[in-house]
Amino acid sequence: MTRPLVVNADDLGLSRGINAAIRRAHVDGIVTSTSLLTVGRYAADAAAMLRATPSLAAGVHLALVGEDPPLLSAREVPTLVDRAGRFPLSYRTFVARAATGRVDLDDVRRELGAQVQAGLDLGLEIGHLDTHQHVHLWPGVGAVVVDLAEQHGIAHVRLPRAHGRSPIGLGVGVLSRRLRDRLVAHGLPVTAYAGLEEAGGMDRAALGRAFRALAATPAAAAEVNVHPGLVDADSSRFDWGYRWEDELAALLDPDVRADLSAHGFHPSTFPVIFGGS
């Protein structure tokens, strides 16, 4: 008997090349689900793609960091932005500010609520919530995200995990366990996960390692988090070192699909597994 595996592509809406790659990775590859960055410049283009591709499940990729500005004004969410009204680029800056009491969780609630509503306004049937750079691992943000899931009847919130033993991996482990306890307390499902450490480098070999790691867990369902893309003029603003096109090639590889099956998984989506919206 096989277990369901969601192959979820993040950052939909970030660029046209990412939008196109995610669609191709679904139509011709193993991607079953995607997360829409509603603050992204190309969110409307992404929503049109989703309407034309109803078999691709979707959720919202909530953002408190990154290259694009928040949906609300600096006056509405002053503790989330700099003097130019922009998010910090990195989770490291956000966490440093949150840890020293400089982030108001009411600002977080207002902005993330606006991002969920933007997804609904674009016609999205939201099957899950996750966050850009996994900032909902921070307990206060995690509490807001879980509340939003309950408020909107969204059946799944990502539980990021790290499989390595680096200092960052150990820190992620502590925060992941706290988030897991919150999900359980609120009756939300806990899903095995892989992809945090491989972000931007999920090639064929990395996917194989992810399948093996997930197959070794007792969880009833699992998620692999990927970042396919096509390099275009807009992607030059992202200095992340991501190998988007290598990830796309791996997700299209028939041998990878066979490897997924060989490890005891079948492709699925969060709404199918958990009965979401």
Image (cartoon, rainbow, N blue to C red):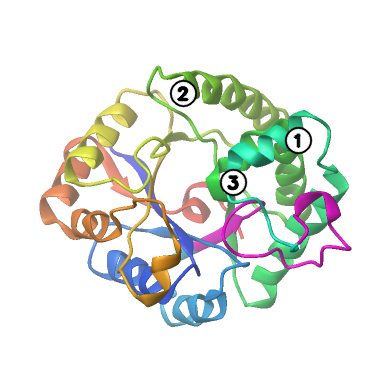
Q: Is residue 96 magenta?
A: no
Q: Amino acid at mark 3?
A: His
Secondary structure beneath dot 3 equals loop
Residue 135 occupies quadrant = top right
Say above or below: 219 vs 157. Answer: above
The answer to whether mark 3 and mark 2 are in CB contact below 8 A is no
Give the label, 1 or 2, closer to the camera: 1
Q: Residues within 10 Å of mark 2 (few under 14, many from 20)?
A: some
Which residue is the extreme one toward the front? 83
Q: Amino acid at mark 2?
A: Gly
Count every numbered label the image shows and give the total: 3
* 79 or 105, nearer to the observer: 79
Secondary structure beneath dot 1 equals helix
Residue 186 occupies quadrant = top right
Say above or below: 143 vs 21. Answer: above
* 15 or 67, nearer to the observer: 67
> Residue 156 has which mark?
3
Q: Please provide percent x and percent y for residue 223.
A: 41, 42
Query: Between disc 3 and disc 1, whose residue precedes?
Result: 1
Mark 3 to mark 1 CA distance (whole Å): 25 Å
* 238 or 218, nearer to the observer: 238
Q: Quadrant of the C terminus?
A: bottom right
Q: Residues within 10 Å of mark 1 (few under 14, many from 20)?
A: some
Q: Note whether residue 32 is visible.
A: yes
Query: Label 2: which residue?
Result: 169
Query: Label 1: which residue?
Result: 98
Q: Is residue 82 magenta?
A: yes
